Image (tube, grey):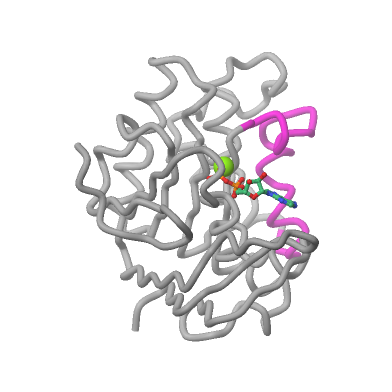
Amino acid sequence: MDVIEISNLYFRYSKREEYLLKGLSLRVRKGELLAITGESGCGKSTLLSIICGIIPHIRKGEIEGEVKLFGREVRDMAIRDISKEVGIVFQDPDSQIFLPTVEDEIAFGPENLMVPREEIGLRIERALKAVNMEEYRLENPNNLSGGQKQLIAIASVLAMETDILLLDEVMSQIDEDGKDKIKRTILNLHREGKTMVIVDHDIDNLSLADRVLELKSGMLREFKGW
Ligand SMILES: Nc1ncnc2c1ncn2[C@@H]1O[C@H](COP(=O)(O)OP(=O)(O)O)[C@@H](O)[C@H]1O
Ligand SMILES: [Mg+2]
């Protein structure tokens, strides 16, 4: 079984006449590092929001077709259960980070899932190790650089210990040094078997992927434009 299975997906935002996604299909294998590119506005973030259930659970729209995680239809799952399978990191780390210390930030998700204290401590350690930021555990995220904040945003999602990680343009506001660190983290996670979908309009950020697809006219196709 593929971990993400989408078939014949049609989607449009409410009050929009045109469909943004038009019969899109996608299968992602366990452990795969898949990249999706496409011009700004083509629907990349929308597609990730559908995979992680933000649409239709939180943001509304007209949606048809199948979207399955581990064989279960996402629209039939509770948000709580979806959050145990898939995590998402967005472009702007400031939109995801709001607590006074790095460790509070990373603990927030697992605390909401009632993970026991001791286990949360271990998860904080593992997540910080994965992004190579162990020495920043007690730091205030506001004192970190953009790239470091993004690593903490990634660590916060890693602490949920989901099998699937979605990364939406996570390198686009980050300097070269920060990008290298994020890429190294992605490759390490890939080696450990995490299933990842990374999205970027800049194909230079996607060369690390096993497979690159292009979203165009509401469908995915093999990307041939290197
Ligand atoms: N909540 C929304 N309501 C209506 N239209 C939206 C909404 N969010 C995004 N859009 C529109 O959908 C299109 C695709 O957006 P998006 O998925 O963010 O594209 P991308 O991530 O590829 O840049 C854009 O035209 C955008 O303006
Ligand atoms: Mg986007």
On the question of residue 84 being in view, the answer is: yes
* Ligand 2: quadrant of the figure: top right
Q: Is residue 178 above or below residue 97?
A: above
Nearer to the camera, 139 or 179: 179
Count of residue discs: 0
Name the residue at 44% across, 45% down: 199
State the extent of the magenta-drawn residues as a range: 92-116
Determine the residue positioned at 34% across, 84% down. Answer: 1
Image height check: is 74 above or below 126?
below
As drawn, 222 above or below 98: below
Residue 112, above or below 145? below
Residue nearest the observer in this picture, 71 or 45 = 45
Q: Examine the structure image and report whether residue 94 is included in the region drawn in magenta.
A: yes
For residue 146, side relative to residue 80 (left or right): left
Within the magenta stretch, is there residue 54? no
Q: For residue 195, which quarter of the picture?
A: bottom left
Rendered image quadrant of residue 16: bottom right
**What residue is shown at x 58% (from left), y 51% (from top)?**
88
Choose top left, top right, bottom left or bottom right for residue 61: bottom right
| Relative to 203, 200 lies left or right | right
